[in-house]
Every structure is written in structure tokens, then in C-alpha cells.
Image: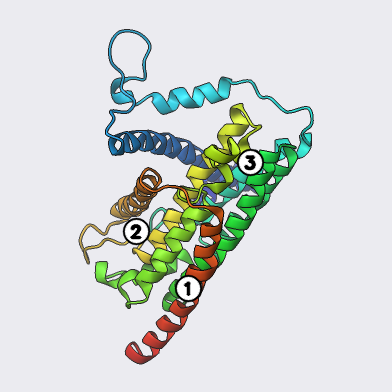
Amino acid sequence: MTVDYIFDFLTGLLGGFLGSDYLLLASMLVPCLAIFGFITIYALIVIYAELKVSSFIQDKVGPMGQGVGLHAGKWGLLQPVADALKLLLKEDIIPSSADRPLFILAPFMIFIGAFISFVAVPFGEFIIVADLNIGLFYILGVGSIAVLSLILAGWASNNKWSLYGGMRSAAQIVSYEIPAGLSLIVVIMLAGTLNLQDIIKYQEGGIFNWIIFDNPFVPIAFVVYFISALAEVNRTPFDLPESESELVAGFATEYSGMRYAFFFLSEYANMFVVSAVAAAGFLGGWQSPFDGFMSTPAWGVFWMISKTGFLIFVMIWLRWTLPRLRVDQLMNVCWKVFLPLALINIFGVAIWTVVFNS
């Protein structure tokens, strides 16, 4: 585990100057700072990618820095930085009628939920903060913090649009967690473990050893999981909790400045986590698609980031391609299509494994 390596390194370097308690604290702070730095840089990159991809889909140029004067740099590369600075410098307004403690708590709570999810995400064969035996279960569990945060934001704002957004998010995320979790049971059945590193190691040997190609039922599980994950992170066509055309900005209507930024930083962080889980569970994680070729630990980081990045690109692509669903359509798809499909999938994988792989 990364924390153990850092602790051993610091003990050898500073063991004669600092006690073990201070060294343990330092060894935990280093990964936390690394995760925060990664989330920040990743969010800036994905925001720029979303601006460019959306512009291409709409037959536009997107952010470009041209001519004399203050602009967003070459090819508009500094546009996400400008947007981030704008939000940082905005006035932080708290409505007089809001429940102040809960209003302040909600954006930080949702970010903490996204932040601690990264603890169990494997970036490479040896790059993981905590190699938990129940890593998959842990990510599903802490991901549920988002529900509480969005309900808090909606309730504490004392605004009907915010409350509608919070109620929608509760119904949507709780509903879609069920088919998403059931789809991941297929992965657990085949790999025989909840440990994400062990799940990835189970898929070594090239692209045709990836779990998604194990039997005809697994691709269906992957599609159900990925679409359910879209709903969990409130991405179009499932962005009903913040639907601008109906609810102004949904649960975030009364937020401004840095608190407003935390909601959307958390959304992008959650996009990475659910995509990383899909990559690790179905697409081989840090395993190379070529057996024995480009399979060193350094290449492993490249493959993991590439697979996760591709799934994030698909999320962006879908956002700018599909219209938003109605609330009744959203719930019908979950309870009448995905839930039965996920349950049938579990039985299908079990029967296939017994008949053909025993």
C-alpha cells in the first residue's frame, strides 16, 4: 500500500528526528495532498476537454486565444483556469433564510465523499493509497455520501427549486445505485474478490481475458453499470436534479463562489471514480490489452488512465448528444428495465459459469 511505502521511506529518512506518530501522520497527509492535486489538475483538463468536445459537436471552435490583449492563452488552454479563478473571486452569498450550518456543510460534504473514494482507486499495479480487501464495496459505500449532501443542499437553501433538486437527486441516486451494484456483483462472482487490485490481476493475459469478454452476459452488465453510473453522477441525460430549464440550477441554485465550484468539482471527481471502477472491473484496469507487451508498471498507469479517460470522453459525448429524460422516464428505465435486466444477468452469468467454465 502507498501509505506503508511512504511511512517506511520517511522512517528511514527522518526516523531519528521525528516520532512514529508524526511520521504516520505525514505518511497519510502526503497521499491526501497528492489526491487533491490530482483532482484539481484532472478537473481543469476535463473541463477544457468538455469545452472543446461540445464545441466540435455543435460545429463551433470553442475557447481560442487570438489577437492582442487579455485572452485564454493559445488554443484556449487557460480557459478552465480563468473559470476557476472567477469562481474563487466571486462573492460568497448565504441567503438570510437559509439553514446556515447545513448550507455551509453540504458542498464540503459532497467533495469529501468524492475525495475519499480515490483512496481505493488503483492507478497502477503499485499505485494505490489503500489496497482494501473490500475496495469495491468501499467505493460504493462512500459514494452514497453524495445523496445526503445534495438533500442537505436542497433543504438548507430554503428555496423551492433547490428542494425539488434535492428530492430528485435522492430518488435518482438511490434508485440507480441498485442496478449499478447488481451489475458489479457479476464482476465479483467471476473474480471471486472485492479487492480491485485482485480483480485486475484476474484479467491478465490480454484483451480477451478481460471480464467484459468472459461470457455473453457481461457486456450487458457493463452497459447497465455505465448508464446507471451516469445517473449517479447526475450527467445528461440524467441531470434532473440540476436541470437548468426547469429548476434554475436545482440544488445549487442559492450557491455561489467556491461553494458552487465544489459541487461541480465533485461531479468531475465522481466521473473519474465510476469510470475507474468500470475500467478496473470490466476492461482489465492497468492490464495491457496485449499479452506480455507494454505491460510494465509504467505502462500500467498509462492503460488505466487511458481506459478511464475514454469512458469519461463517452460521458461528455453523451451529454452533448442526448436530450434530458423526463422524471417518469428516468424512474421507469431504472425499475422496469435495468433492475430486472441486472437480476437476470446475475443468474445468466452463474448458469454460464457452471455449464461452460466448470
What is the CA distance from the residue labelled 2 to the residue labelled 3? Answer: 36 Å
Residue 249 can be seen, yes or no: yes
Q: Dot 1: within a 10 Å radius of its alpha carbon, few (fewer than 14), some, or many (20 or more) residues?
A: many
Q: Nearer the viewer, residue 2 or 338?
A: 338
Position of 163 relative to 69 (above/below):
below
**Residue 326 point in image, percent of width and height:** 52, 52
Of the residues under marks 2 and 3, which one precedes in the sequence? 3
Of the residues under marks 1 and 2, which one precedes in the sequence? 2
Q: Quadrant of the C terminus?
A: bottom left
Of the residues under marks 1 and 3, which one precedes in the sequence? 3
**Residue 291 point in image, percent of width and height:** 22, 67
Q: Which mark is residue 124?
A: none
Picture residue at 41% right of the left edge, 56% below the top: 126
Position of 61 relative to 238 (above/below):
above
Q: Nearer the viewer, mark 1 or mark 2?
A: 1
What is the CA distance from the residue labelled 1 to the residue labelled 2? Answer: 26 Å
Q: Looking at the rendering, which quadrant does residue 41 occupy?
A: top left
SS for dot 1: helix
- Residue with the mark numbered 2: 286
- Residue with the mark numbered 3: 251
Asked if disc 2 and disc 3 are in contact, CB closer than 8 Å, the reply is no
User: What amino acid type should be assigned to the residue bearing mark 1?
Assistant: Ala
